[in-house]
Amino acid sequence: DTVKGDAALKLGVVSLFPEMFDALTQHGVSGRAVREGIIDIGFWNPRDYATDRHRTVDDRPYGGGPGMLMKVDTLRAAIRDARQSLMSEDGVPPKVIYLSPQGRVLDHTGVRELADHGRLVVVAGRYEGIDERVIDADIDEQWSIGDYVLSGGELPAMVLMDAVARMVPGVLGHAQSAEEDSFADGLLDCPHYTRPESIDGHGVPPVLLSGNHQEIRKWRLKQSLGRTWCYRPDLLEDRMLTKEEQTLLDDFIREYVA
Ligand SMILES: Nc1nonc1C(=O)NC1CCNCC1
């Protein structure tokens, strides 16, 4: 598979199960971005590099113990081809990422950093993982989506790729990108409401029905600040608040503890 064209984001995926990535390429905003050529995704399957009759892609660990590792020669060949295909015209190589619990935990800051790079090869491991010497020689950065163990790197790869894709101009419609602002500037999202106006007797906050856009903006910002203060105060620790934000948060806390 090759990645060509002038897409804003070029992705190469090394995986034994490329069909899993249909979840990203065949659906939703990411699917549209791929269809429209805003994002290019190429796939390289280590199994395509196997030369033995059984097309072996796993190998036994030195030192024994349970589980297998990804076979080195087929994995390295796939990474090499993906890396070469994503090399830019002026020879700038892509950033090669390996998903594993040993990696830096992905957050909004990390997503922005990765999106800014523009060309990424994402290596999805299976089995117990990959040989440490391949990590040292072929992987630029290790990333984790959280502290739990999954069966493969494909779901983590898709989480990372989806979050990065949403950073690319044109992937989200203007309306949605505006909506992204709440978390984009380090706050939790505000509550959302749609029809019907009453659900089991529970109504909609009147300000949202008022048509007063300034008041609606302030209400939503106050709710985002208040929810962040309640559920994720750690996010507020290293986030400067504007005077308006500080006032809105003080009001929220006053009402909350009243
Ligand atoms: N959490 C994770 N964030 O990125 N990758 C993660 C992960 O659990 N990978 C598995 C680890 C065991 N081998 C198969 C892959």
Image (cartoon, rainbow, N blue to C red):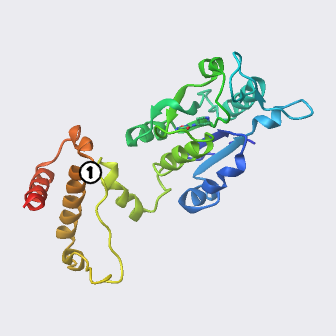
Numbered disc 1: secondary structure: helix
User: Residue at left 74%, top 24%?
Assistant: 72
Task: Identify which residue, 217 or 194, lies in the foreground.
Answer: 194
Whether 49 is drawn above or below 194: the answer is above
- Give the quadrant of residue 122: top right
Identify the image quadrant of the C terminus. Answer: bottom left
Question: Looking at the image, in which quadrant does ligand 1 appear?
Answer: top right
Residue found 47% across the figure and 59% down from its top: 172
Q: Residue at x 26, y 79 (%)?
A: 202
Rendering coords of residue 100 (x, y %): 55, 33
Give coordinates of residue 25: x percent, y percent.
63, 55
Residue that protrudes farthest toward the front in the picture: 65
Q: Mark 1 points at which residue?
A: 231
From the Cβ of disc 1, is ligand 1 less than 8 Å away?
no
Q: Residues within 10 Å of mark 1 (few under 14, many from 20)?
A: few
51 lies left or right of 197: right
Number of numbered discs on residues: 1
User: Which residue is painted at 22% across and 52% down in the image?
Assistant: 230
- Quarter of the rendering containing residue 50: top right
